Amino acid sequence: MLLAGLARLAWLVRGRDAAGLGALREAREQRTHIAVRLLAATMKAAYQVRPELCVTLANTSVALCLRDGNTPDCAIGYMVHGAIFQGGVLGRHAQGNAYGELVLSLVERYQNSAQRAEVSFVVGYFATAWRQPAEAAEALFQRALAAGLESGDDFHVGCAAAGLGMSRVMRGAPPALIIHEGEAHLAILRARRLDETVATLASAIALTRLLHEDAPMPEVATDAVLAAYGSRHFAHFQLLAAAIAAWHTGDEPRARALLKRAEALLPDARGMLHSAEHVFWQASRGEQATPAWPSTRCASLVGRVDSARTSVPSPRW
């Protein structure tokens, strides 16, 4: 189902880049506006349950916009199809970055304050960081945090605060910035009982304190707790941070065991920068690196989608 939808959408999009999609007229049919709004509302839940379902819903949304025109809620479909799937999962980073710019502009064009936090976070997390300096992604996380606080989008408030702390640690930002900013954000997240992102941001702060103050690193949660996360890519980062801490303290067996636990969650981090961080630490310790999405599988999917583009018949609406 996913592959067929991708092939059909590739045929529909042919000849249009991300800017061309942004130039589509606005849909006139009210039912198209309603359909795209409903699809956008269900994609976040679908991603938590089954990412492939989220991509399928996004393909449907983009196809509707290609047929009828864009709507004020169309950014989410383009974001999932372009920034997450094309850019993050398939590794077409230039395309993902272009879609990221598209959806950011669509949110502002339609002044969609309800989507600003989600779009800003996701674009920074999946698209911007692969093509632009880390500070550009961090600026989007800061925008997402402010927008989420304004709109009441607590979920993406947590995501943005955690993403910002993770990025700052991975690029080696000043320790004082990571700690002081992170502690302020932890208070915001704790007040909203955002346990998963609280633990993730706390791990970034704790790793920074260990590296620069020799403060002990708290124990990471059990596999049973982490496996129950709705956003398991955050659980992956926590295990990776704990592994780095163990290497720093000279506990090689513990570090390798933690990295092995993190490897089980690596597929959940596809398209995110901490998947590259994971592979870097594997390779630097003399272990065989395991990509989040095996290159043969990714190449196979890309090839099957591309080869199907010319064989998909003209759609009949």
Image (tube, grey):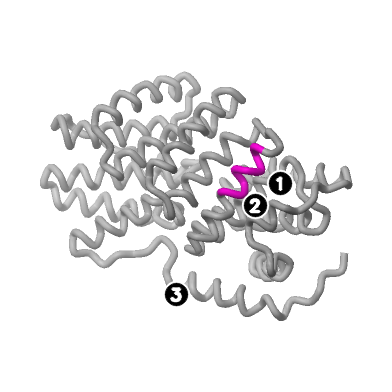
| Residue type pointed to by label 2 | Tyr
Q: Secondary structure at mark 2?
A: helix
Q: Is residue 69 magenta?
A: no
Most common secondary structure along the magenta stretch: helix
Front-most of residues 176 and 194 = 176
Would residue 85 appear left or right of 11 to someone viewing this image? Answer: left
Task: Specify start and end residues of the magenta stretch as a single range.
Answer: 101-108
Q: Secondary structure at mark 3?
A: helix
Q: Provide the residue designation for mark 2.
A: 78
How many other residues sit within 10 Å of disc 2, few (<14), some (14-19) or many (≥20)?
many
| Residue type pointed to by label 3 | Thr
- The quadrant of the image that shows the C terminus is bottom right
The label shown at residue 259 is none
Quadrant in the picture for residue 175 = top left
Would residue 304 appear left or right of 243 to someone viewing this image? Answer: right
How many other residues sit within 10 Å of disc 3, few (<14), some (14-19) or many (≥20)?
few
- Residue 316 in percent (x, y) is at 87, 69
Q: In the rendered image of this protein, does residue 55 appear above or below residue 296?
A: above
Q: CA distance from mark 2 to mark 3?
A: 26 Å
Q: Earlier in the sequence, mark 2 or mark 3?
A: 2
Q: Provide the residue designation for mark 1.
A: 74
Q: Provide the residue designation for mark 3.
A: 296
